[in-house]
Image (cartoon, grey):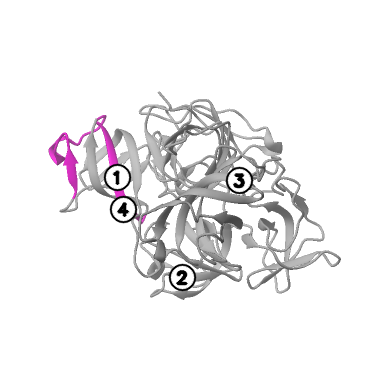
Amino acid sequence: MMKTCLRAACAVLTLALLSSCGGGGGGVPIAALAGSGAGAVAGPGGPDADQSLLQRSPGPAGGGSGPGDTGAGSGGSSGGGGTSVAGGDDGSGVGSGGTGVSTADAGIGSVDGAGSILVNGVHYNTDGAVVVLDDVPGLQLGMTAKVTGPFDTDLTSGSAQRVESAIDLRGPASSVNVGQGSFVILGTTVTTDEATVWADARGAADIAAGATLQVWGLPSAPGSLRATRVEVHASGTPILSGVVQNLDAVARRFSIGGTTIDYAQATVTGGAAGLPFANGVLVRVRASAVGNGPLVASSVQWWYPAPAADGVALQLAGVVTDFNGLASLRVLGRPVNASAAKVSGGPERSVGNGVKVIVGGVMSGGVLQANRLKIQNVPGTGGQPSFSLTGQISTFNSIADFRIKGQPIDASGPKVVFVNGTAANLAAHVRVSVEGSRVADGVLIADRVTFQ
């Protein structure tokens, strides 16, 4: 039984598994989150086609609708049409390590589990939820997303009414720095940490300069994105997310990082709470192609807008910027006062610019008055990423190669802990909960397996 919820809410989070969105914001209803034998179509790169987390049905032709409170069109995603998903739930959980924002009214963050959605430590039941995705056929670990629905005052459980997700950055990689785990796409520096999901690579060392990548992540300082998921992609129209800089409303140009954007022909949609299009706003830009001049935008959307009204319960996961002490900092561009917050995950003194955190509280006067702050990652000191997956084993080849809802898992490590059973009990159709600290080459490396 869920605890008393604060109110109906919208939360943005990084998701593990999504499905492409429907055109015009309406979408086409599809089957529930797939349990064993649900007959769902596998997500990208997943040969286990009958066991992916979300079952997909064809969407209408034309541009998809991007995440945002208005459901405005995205200006044409690479895949043409999209899908809207009415999600069911078999009691399993999925999440991305808890990056993003989630609130009783709005949220943004990262998914760290599968089945029902685990975001920022909140386990959302997805029975009846509508899932709206852009550019991708299904939710995968590490994808950013927005979840609307109530959650309890302990920030542990909730009920998703709507889940939205879209790619945050896509283009050719340059300036790959293997030592720092960073690279540049369209003038934006992409950094990674222990919680970054590498879908088809083991890390930055596997990235070839010039390769087209698509990235989900959390905008931080201007021109910087902390990646939550990285995929190598053959091609695709450019997508760029970040903080608006150098806005020229007359010439209809602005910049994100090192890239100038011409939005003279673009549709600008998705503003939250009547906020104007201005410097400092987080946006997602879609363009037709990369040329020698400015990036010509086809659409500009607010990046997962969250409500700012007084009394709104909000949970944000992101990277700290503009840090002037716990009483004055920003997460995902939102002012935060965490002076009275209970701090966990590390000492208070470690909070500062570049630190990845989860903050939760209530909006007042345009500021999130946080009562909780959890430190997720301090650059240079590591972190405690946590991915979880619960469900029946759909395909079992060996302890080093089995799948739950299409997600490959390796539990062969010497330090894996087995609870209520042993490695010998792993087999097809056995129901387990798997926790792991990283995803490399698309494989969840298990640390703990609990038989249910």
Task: Give the secondary structure at mark 2.
Answer: strand
In primary-sequence order, the first of circles 4 and 3 is 3
Q: Position of residue 212 (x, y in %)?
A: 53, 63
Residue 99 placement, left or right of 403: right
Q: Nearer the viewer, mark 4 or mark 3?
A: 3
Of marks 2 and 4, the one in the foreground:
4
- Contact (CB < 8 A) between labels 1 and 2? no
Secondary element type, mark 4: strand
Is residue 437 a member of the stretch shown in magenta? yes
Residue 322 placed where, x, y %? 57, 66
Viewer-side label of 2, 3: 3
Proximity of marks 1 and 3: CB atoms separated by less than 8 Å: no
> Which circle's residue, 2 or 4, is located before the other in the chain?
2
**Residue 213 locus on image (x, y percent):** 52, 61
Disc marking residue 435: 1
Badge 4: how crowded within 10 Å, few (<14), some, or many (20+)?
Answer: some
Give the Cα distance between marks 2 and 4: 20 Å
Which amino acid is tagged 2?
A: Ser
C-alpha distance separating marks 1 and 2: 26 Å
Residue on which disc 3 sits: 363
**Residue 151 forms part of the magenta stretch:** no
Badge 3 amino acid: Met
Residue that numbered label 2 is attached to = 182
Q: Image height check: is 393 above or below 242?
A: above
Label 1 CA crowd tier, 10 Å (few <14, some 14–19, many 20+): many
Q: Nearer the viewer, residue 353 or 238?
A: 353
Q: CA distance from mark 4 to mark 3?
A: 32 Å
